[in-house]
Amino acid sequence: MSLNVKKHFRDLIYIVTILFFLFIIFIPAIYVLTYAIGGKIEISGELMKALSVSFSVALIVTIINLFFGVALAWVFVKSKSKYKIWLDNLIDLPLIVPTAALGLSVYLFWGEFWNFEKGLVMIILLHIIFTLPYMVRSVAASIEQINNTYNEAATTLGATVFTLFRTIDLPLFKNGVVTGAVLTFTRSLSETGATMMVASMATMTAPVFVVNLKNSGDVPQAAVASIILILSALSILFIAKFLTRKKHFNFNYIYPKFEQSLSNLYNVRNFILTLFFLFIILIPTFYIIFYNFANFSPIFNSQILESFVISFGIAFAVTLVGLIFAIPMAYFIARSKNRKLASLFENLHDVVLLVPTSALGFSLAMFWGKLEFNELLILALSHLCFTFPLLVKPITTAISNIDFSIEESALCLGASYQKVITSILFPLILPAIVAGSIMAFMRSLSETGATLAVSHDVKTISVLIVDLVKNNQLAEAGFLCFVLFMIAFIFLIVLKGTKKKM
Amino acid sequence: MPNIELKKITKTFTSINEATKGEIITAVDNASLKIKKYSYNTLLGPSGCGKTTLLRMISGLENPTEGKVFFDKKDVTNMPTQERDIGFVFQNYSLFPHMDIWHNVSYGPIVRNKFTKETEKYIHSILKMVKLDERAKAYPNELSGGMKQRVAVARAIATKSPLMLLDEPLGALDVRIGTALRYDLMKLVKKYKLTAIHVTHNQEEAMTISDNIIMMKRGKVIQSGSPKEIYKNPNSIFSAYFLGRCNFFQCEMIDKNTANFQGTIIKLPKNYTRKKVVLGVRGEKIHINNILKRENIQGTIEFINFLGEKWQYIIRLSDGTEISALKRTPHKAKIRQKVSISFYADNILIFNKPKDFESEKSV
């Protein structure tokens, strides 16, 4: 092939990928917005209430996470303790454990063990668990990027620990905090299945409300709720972009006594953080395992088996199909010379990632329902939709981190484009592909919001768990959660293994 | 403050490198030294010799594994960096990227809670000194390398600390700017009556700015003294080679004041009792003769390098020894020509023959 033909071939791959993204992922995800053009927008009192519950939960959870997440991340990065490796492993667990399992575990711990009432407090306790890792991870990642000599320079100039945190570190890792807060807020706004287990009738959240409306056939109200959820996710994205823009912070004052006294609070801080992590995060997460030791009831009927097959089949299929398009998409975003277009697509991925999944599911059902697609196919398409950005993100980061001169030197040595991709690029981004695949696979396995919004009869394993809990079959649900928990654990070990190689 | 004294300082690290994981590495090995008030000192040595680690232990950024650090006879070994009252200039300057020049420079007085109207004037005067008063509102990424370096120095001076520690402060600059800034640095230190400890691997830099040079090799302090002292009387093959590239002749002693270099008899300036000896002669002290004399050392000219103000002749002796002779005016000899070389007994430096000559010389 001549160089020209090769370039055309590459452009063709880009075009197919972009078309795939626009028509399979992006437009279906926000199709419901078109309803606002023709339909009447009316907000019922019930919807208002559900929205207010959702937003107040998301806000409270974000504030709590800001405090504990930033503190944990800072201690975590700065700590030289030998227990750090344990914390490192534990902190990701709620990211990968299916939220249905988490929800049941939290319900059993607070509800059954401590006899708490279902409701707002329990929703908040649940949401803190599965959002905290997002906060800790994104803050820790940006702290790690700060050149340590800034801290050393500030120390030699006389800054105490807290002054240093406020004047040097915080301004420099601010963007990580914003990212963490956005993810916390939108994930909290989006979670459906686990929330159903711990919410009372009075404290129904908006995504749960959408699913209920959809199932009772109240399409207009469900559409309105979805539109509001999508628009709020979008506005949060805009606010975040605005907040990350400011780069300059000059400090003229310090509060010597106050900051000195805070700097001396080492032990108190560590004690509070340990208590929080142990009793709010760790024990409620693992309670399901203890519960199973006490009430072990392994059951495998045809319905459970069918759910397992559907769940794993869909998860496997969407990860595979997603990968085929995610790699060229990531390459396009990381390497395209048209930076404006590339960053536009990056932002569009963020939109899909942040849209609450029940709204996304409802939107997809509207879009594909017109074409009278099979329910299972629509379900698979919806899973493809929310897992796709999870694949694209880490691969994009991995490609951006590879110095382009490495590819150029391979080209100069005489390697063809194909050879460069297979022998240079692919081996270098493989860890990111594995990491992204596991995240996508587990997300598909655990997702409930979009799944409930799309399907009536097809039940994934996570939806089945939610149903079992609704019918008070706690022992059976507990066993299924235990199985999912173990699968998550195995994947976590694989994930750690590939991270080490990166 | 500050007469500084280090007593038997040792620093060991556990290696985190994949290949040597877990091994104990000694970065600084039983180093002792004294620094006089108001003097400009350089820690000079090849990379990896432990000079930066030593500087970081003086600043408190690292703690010694063994030994003690004294500021004016006060033990500060366990004192946190914040309380040591020092100014530190980092190799890559470490200017806070989110603060403008003014706030970078005033950060020290502010966090030490010493910021007054007078400080403000003082900072203006420092910025004027380093010719950056007009760029006070600029951010670090808008400055050139030389400007950043000057801001880093100004920031350290603004703390009014009497001790200034500089970790390869000119290392990241291109040669021309770095050379010009040497003198600015020296002037500032003298003007503000500071005691400076400056880490460098550049012997020329060390010789031009120092009152006192501390030579280091493999974690050990080899020799310290004024540039002139060390150049004239190096106490080791390493000192002689690292400071001013000395030529060496490995000889055997015939009697107590004559040595034999491959059949050539060399008279020594003083008596020497061991059997084997290494003689050192500086390049500018070597004479080249076109006439081949039997009683002189002979060799072939391999390269002639024009260095601007002088000419360098690289001469290969028959045993493979490489000799560099420096001449202020060009010599008649041509490349590949056989010549003989000679030098005066007064210009000979005498060293004990080490077990492994090459490793002793090597940096």
Image: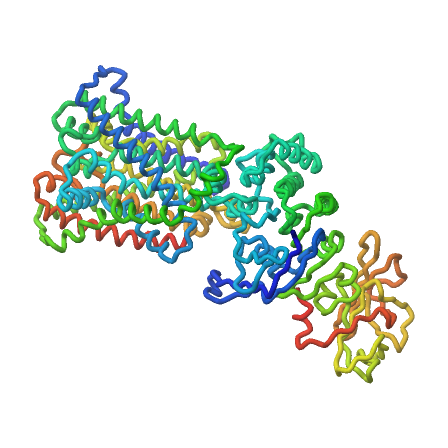
Query: Residue A86's quadrant in the figure?
Result: bottom left
The residue closer to the viewer here, B61 or B322, is B61
> Does A485 sit left or right of B162 as displayed?
left
Most foreground residue, A25 or B313? B313
Count of marks, rendered view: 0
Left or right: A492 with respect to A428?
Answer: left
Q: Which picture quadrant has residue B316? A: bottom right
Colour logic: rainbow
Q: Residue furthest bottom?
A: B255
In this orientation, does residue B277 appear? Answer: yes
A127 or A121: nearer the viewer: A121
Is A361 above or below relative to A392? above
Q: Can residue A373 be seen here?
A: no
Q: Position of residue A94 (x, y in %)?
A: 27, 46
- How far across and down, in percent of the image, does residue A477 sit? 12, 46
- x and y, in percent, of residue A188 in the image: 27, 35
**Image point 44% across, 52% down: which residue?**
A423
Q: Position of residue B193 (x, y in %)?
A: 71, 46
Which residue sits at x=63%, y=45%?
B161
Quarter of the image where one finds residue B31: bottom right
Q: Name the residue located 32 percent from the left edge and 38 percent from the top edge.
A: A65
Looking at the image, which is closer to me, B250 or B95? B95
Furthest-right residue in view?
B291
